């Protein structure tokens, strides 16, 4: 019989589980019921007790490791802790969120246990046995994977399941001891841009896409790159949006053209870019060509602003197309959003 373990870790606060962890928990609860398998949940954190309260109602056996060494991600300590949790649970199937913390350590943990790991899993289902789905080749090929190797580790993509919501009273937490190896790395802190400087925000409710039109000559024959920067940044701040781009816009920096300074290739959406997941998307000054729009496949509601009524968005690619000047529309929208705030 299968034994299902869901591995989780705390978020930046140290007191709560990460949202992606709670998504894996929800997937685990559902799959354990479908497989008729016992469910175990493992927690990695310095003080997992308060995080464990979020697992109320899962009916799972809860295991946790606790040590100051687990307050922050570090390969050696995380690998030792996760190995101990999998061994204690005697797991044959392991679900875990594909967070940066787990993605870098899980292949090593699978190797230590003689198991097999699959990454970028977007859904799991029970047929005769467990089946996992993932995309290959820039989201053009979808594969359903089955494996006989055990333990089988599956890193689940964030945003593919609704997070678990605690109900009822919490279960007891069993503490698992870990023999830590000699730790050569000391985590002295995290250096990261301020949140409002980060333009890629996977948790945002809305994706704002800027196209090359923002840096093209406008009706007055002039380029308005500085104004474009202010309008785009203004929208990102006012709507807590994530910033995407067309390829043409991010490629301009190599061609000595007017550029938006905060835009990098990391923002590119499309066939040769990213395929983010957000409930809504707003495209601006972008033509909506197929190699770009293919990156919108996981955006549920799509709107676009273009001055060209024959652009790609008009041909069935957007739910709503506003044929208008994005400079004027976004200035007005920002003013309304700021009034509301
Ligand atoms: C193999 C391959 C892979 C590719 N991969 C990608 C990819 O991953 N992602 C990607 O984005 N592209 C990709 N492309 C390129 C893609 O085909 C397009 O060339 C690109 O998306 C065009 O970018 P754009 O729409 O921003 O620019 P443009 O085509 O220049 O369109 C600019 C638009 O802005 C509008 N506009 C101008 N001013 C305003 C204004 N004031 N208000 C409103 N609208 C305005 C114009 O009417 C125009 O429609 C790929 C191409 C190939 C061949």
Image: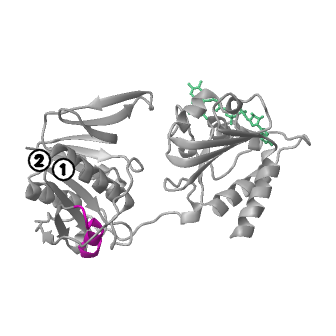
Say which quarter of the image contains residue 308.
top right
Q: CA distance from mark 1 to mark 2?
A: 6 Å
Residue extending furthest toward the front: 168
Per the rendered image, the range of residues in magenta is 48-58
- Is 203 above or below relative to 47? above
Q: Would residue 77 be found to the left or right of residue 98 on screen?
A: left
Say which quarter of the image contains residue 46.
bottom left
| Residues marked 1 and 2 touching at CB (< 8 Å) | yes
Secondary element at image label 2: loop
Answer with the quadrant where ligand 1 appears in the image.
top right
Q: Would residue 180 be found to the left or right of residue 307 on screen?
A: left
- Is 214 above or below relative to 139? below
Q: Is most of the magenta stretch helix, strand or loop? A: helix
Q: Which mark is residue 57?
A: none
What residue is rendered at 85% in x and 41% in y?
A: 218
What residue is rendered at 23% in x and 72% in y?
A: 170
Name the spot of residue 89 as percent of width and height, x first: 11, 56
Residue beneath disc 1: 109
């Amino acid at each position: 019989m299968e034994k299902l373990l869901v591995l989780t870790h705390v978020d930046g606060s140290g007191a709560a589980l990460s949202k992606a962890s709670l998504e894996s928990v929800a997937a685990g609860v559902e799959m354990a019921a479908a497989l008729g398998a016992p469910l175990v949940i493992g927690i990695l954190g310095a003080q997992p007790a308060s995080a464990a309260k979020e697992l109320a109602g899962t009916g799972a056996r809860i295991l946790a490791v606790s040590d100051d060494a687990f307050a922050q991600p570090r390969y050696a300590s995380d690998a030792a802790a996760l190995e101990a949790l999998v061994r204690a649970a005697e797991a044959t199937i392991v679900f875990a969120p594909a967070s940066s913390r787990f993605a870098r350590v899980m292949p090593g943990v699978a190797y230590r246990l003689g198991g097999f790991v699959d990454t970028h899993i977007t859904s799991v289902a029970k047929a005769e046995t467990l089946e996992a789905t993932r995309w290959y080749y820039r989201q053009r090929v979808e594969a359903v994977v089955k494996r006989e190797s055990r333990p089988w580790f599956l890193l689940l993509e964030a945003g593919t399941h609704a997070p678990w919501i605690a109900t009822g009273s919490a279960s007891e937490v069993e503490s698992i001891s870990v023999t830590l190896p000699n730790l050569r790395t000391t985590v002295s802190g995290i250096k990261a841009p301020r949140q409002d400087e980060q333009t890629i925000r996977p948790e945002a409710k809305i994706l704002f896409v800027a196209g090359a039109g923002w840096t093209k000559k406008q009706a007055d024959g002039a380029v308005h790159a500085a104004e474009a920067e202010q309008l785009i940044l203004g929208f990102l701040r006012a709507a807590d949006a994530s910033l995407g781009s067309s390829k043409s816009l991010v490629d301009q920096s190599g061609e000595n053209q007017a550029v938006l300074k905060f835009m990098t290739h990391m923002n590119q959406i499309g066939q040769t870019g990213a395929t983010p997941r957000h409930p809504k998307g707003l495209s601006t000054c972008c033509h909506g060509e197929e190699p770009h729009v293919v990156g919108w496949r996981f955006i549920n509601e799509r709107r676009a602003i273009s001055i060209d009524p024959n652009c790609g968005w008009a041909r069935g690619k957007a739910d709503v197309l506003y044929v208008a000047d994005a400079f004027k529309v976004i200035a007005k929208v920002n003013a309304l959003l700021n009034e509301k705030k």
